[in-house]
Image (tube, rainbow, N blue to C red):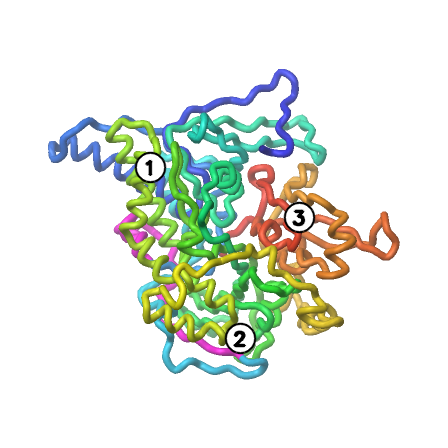
């Protein structure tokens, strides 16, 4: 339930009946909608042509809810796309204007020391990207949305789904969040109550750490018997280089510098227009309380190897997000009475290859195939019907790809060098390794150690002292980077970041951990300021209008003291190129 859901006297919520409701306008949700409409059309055309027996399916109202102001505004990824699902969904995607930046022409892996680099003589198979495409996920999802709209699919941007509606254990729709409440939750003159959307079947495709599905999973015990969810945090910049200096189509991955206390790596992609995409991904099951991917990304640009490629450039875009890393054994139950879950919300990411878009698309398409089957049968979407979705996942490449790396994160979490024998054995045994399943016993929030234990008594000062000086061109402080995301929220609206006990922040977290949220947040949302209550202490101040919806705070706070909830629809980053 939302924190504020009371309505002014005389105001009621409008109820809308739809046939298929998809929560999330990303690659998974849009692929589900488009494939379903295409398959309904094919089914009806085949019956009309006499090549198939049966009844035509009447026109279905397919609705996609997207919390961003427009599709793509919250879409963020590296991104290198494996096109196998795209070829199936839109066979003529190139002719149809799919916004591909470049086909991958070169790939390489380097190890970075503090001031040297070493190129691996052979690129490991997981890092082979020939035949894949470098693209902007925000542009790609906008294009997918245009294909959906051409087919008559209804996309509602600016609507955040905040509550699932139940009849027993059956999900019958969702409620969207109210708009036009002030900081205290009171209705303003422009108040608009959220909608009640009733549906035959609901697809959850919210992306990483889906805030609505998190509630559903808890209520229906969908993660019982599964590995814990674990996540990674990624940040990236797009750097404009001088004309004629960048060869497009290169994909470079690195290990080593600048990360020393955390597992992770970096990526560098080159695209037309003399632009370089530079990013860093770090595991959130790090013990380091000072983990700060934005800070590490700035340090990365000082390395001689990277500096040789980005010197003279200007950062023109920035963003950050989390991605699910638990893989196959962390996936929740995928179906139930009246619902299915797809893509990143269901932990469908190959973290070895850092690939998830094609898996999200394929899972959405397989959910669509299951919906079509239910419509043809004229059946209610009971578990008997939706279970076919899980069968499709298990029988296709979503499982084959994820199962092959089912223990990868667990092994690599032991350290880059310590994990090498385990990873080698997994490669030989098809992912099994020494132990299968290899458990994930702790969530990311529970592994954080004190600053003194990890860095020593002067750890914070040492880390901040290594930061390059911001110049507004190549090096940025965090607040200036946030400006590049275009993020915005109504300042007179409820704070969507719920801190449960601010006393913990003052008395325990800041003295011992130096407030990890001040570091891991890629958007300068959290800062400690001199306390008005206790002299010599600091209070947590939440700049919620800076939020770029990565949800790291919901995942990594060592006391699980922060809950990310969906803000008023339309708020958040305004990604255009990421």
Look at 38% across and 67% down and name the residue there: 433
Look at 39% across and 50% down and name the residue there: 360
Residue 196 visible? The answer is yes
**Residue 213: image x %, image y %?**
49, 41
Q: Is residue 124 above or below residue 37?
A: below
**Residue designated by label 2:** 256
Neighbor class of circle 3 (other Cα within 10 Å; few <14, some 14-19, many 20+) is some
Indicate the quadrant where residue 404 lies.
Answer: bottom left
Disc 1 element: helix
CB atoms of marks 2 and 3 within 8 Å: no
Disc 2 element: strand
Q: Is residue 457 above or below residue 343?
A: below
**Residue designated by label 3:** 561
In this picture, residue 217 sits left or right of residue 536:
left
The magenta segment is 83-112
CA–CA distance in space, label 2 to label 3: 32 Å
CB atoms of marks 3 and 1 within 8 Å: no
Mark on residue 386?
Answer: 1
Indicate the quadrant where residue 59 lies.
Answer: top left
Looking at the image, tell me whether mark 2 or mark 3 is earlier in sequence order.
2
Looking at the image, tell me whether mark 3 or mark 1 is earlier in sequence order.
1
Viewer-side label of 2, 1: 1
């Amino acid at each position: 339930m939302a924190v504020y859901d009371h309505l002014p006297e005389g105001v009621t919520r409008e109820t809308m009946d739809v046939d298929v409701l998809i929560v999330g306008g990303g690659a998974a949700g849009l692929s589900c909608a488009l494939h379903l409409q295409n398959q309904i059309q094919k089914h009806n055309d085949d019956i009309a042509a006499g090549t198939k027996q049966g009844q035509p399916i009447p026109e279905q109202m397919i609705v996609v809810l997207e919390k961003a102001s427009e599709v793509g505004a919250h879409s963020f990824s590296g991104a290198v796309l494996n096109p196998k699902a795209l070829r199936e969904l839109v066979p003529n995607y190139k002719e149809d204007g799919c916004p591909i930046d470049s086909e991958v022409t070169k790939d390489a892996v380097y190890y970075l020391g503090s001031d040297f680099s070493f190129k691996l003589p052979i690129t490991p198979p997981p890092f082979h990207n020939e035949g894949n495409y470098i693209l902007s996920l925000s542009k790609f999802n906008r294009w997918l949305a245009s294909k959906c709209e051409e087919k008559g699919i209804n996309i509602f941007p600016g609507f955040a789904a905040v509550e699932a509606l139940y009849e027993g254990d059956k999900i019958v729709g969702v409620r969207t969040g109210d708009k036009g409440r002030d900081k205290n939750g009171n209705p303003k003159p422009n108040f608009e109550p959220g909608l009640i959307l009733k549906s035959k079947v609901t697809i959850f495709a919210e992306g990483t750490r889906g805030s609505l599905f998190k509630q559903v999973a808890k209520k229906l015990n969908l993660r019982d018997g599964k590995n814990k969810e674990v996540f990674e945090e990624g940040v990236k910049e797009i750097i404009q280089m001088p004309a004629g200096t960048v060869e497009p189509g290169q994909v470079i991955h690195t290990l080593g510098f600048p990360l020393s206390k955390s597992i992770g790596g970096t990526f560098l992609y080159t695209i037309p227009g003399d632009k370089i995409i530079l990013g860093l991904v770090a595991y959130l099951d790090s013990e380091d309380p000072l983990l700060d991917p934005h800070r590490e990304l700035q340090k990365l640009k000082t390395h001689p190897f990277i500096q040789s490629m980005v010197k003279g450039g200007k950062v023109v875009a920035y963003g950050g997000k989390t991605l699910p890393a638990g893989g196959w054994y962390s996936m929740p139950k995928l179906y139930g009475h009246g619902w299915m879950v797809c893509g990143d919300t269901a932990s469908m990411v190959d973290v070895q290859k850092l690939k998830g878009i094609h898996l999200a698309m394929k899972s959405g398409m397989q959910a669509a195939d299951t919906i079509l089957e239910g419509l043809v049968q004229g059946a209610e979407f009971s578990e008997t019907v939706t279970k076919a979705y899980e069968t499709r996942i298990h029988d296709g490449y979503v499982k084959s790809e994820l199962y092959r790396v089912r223990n990868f994160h667990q092994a690599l979490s032991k350290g880059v060098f310590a994990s090498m024998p385990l990873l080698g054995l997994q490669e030989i045994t098809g992912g099994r390794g020494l132990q299968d399943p290899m458990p994930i016993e702790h969530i990311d929030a529970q592994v954080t150690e004190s600053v003194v234990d990890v860095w020593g008594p002067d750890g914070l000062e040492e880390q901040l002292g290594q930061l390059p000086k911001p110049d507004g061109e190549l090096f940025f402080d965090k607040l200036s980077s946030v400006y590049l995301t275009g993020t915005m929220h109504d300042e007179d609206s409820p704070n969507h970041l719920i801190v449960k006990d601010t006393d913990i922040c003052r008395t325990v977290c800041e003295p011992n951990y130096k407030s990890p949220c001040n570091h891991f947040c890629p958007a300068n949302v959290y800062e400690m300021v001199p306390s008005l209550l206790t002299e010599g202490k600091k209070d947590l101040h939440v700049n919620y209008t800076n939020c770029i919806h990565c949800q790291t705070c919901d995942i990594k706070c060592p006391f699980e003291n922060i809950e990310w909830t969906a803000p008023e629809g339309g708020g958040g980053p305004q990604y255009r190129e990421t």
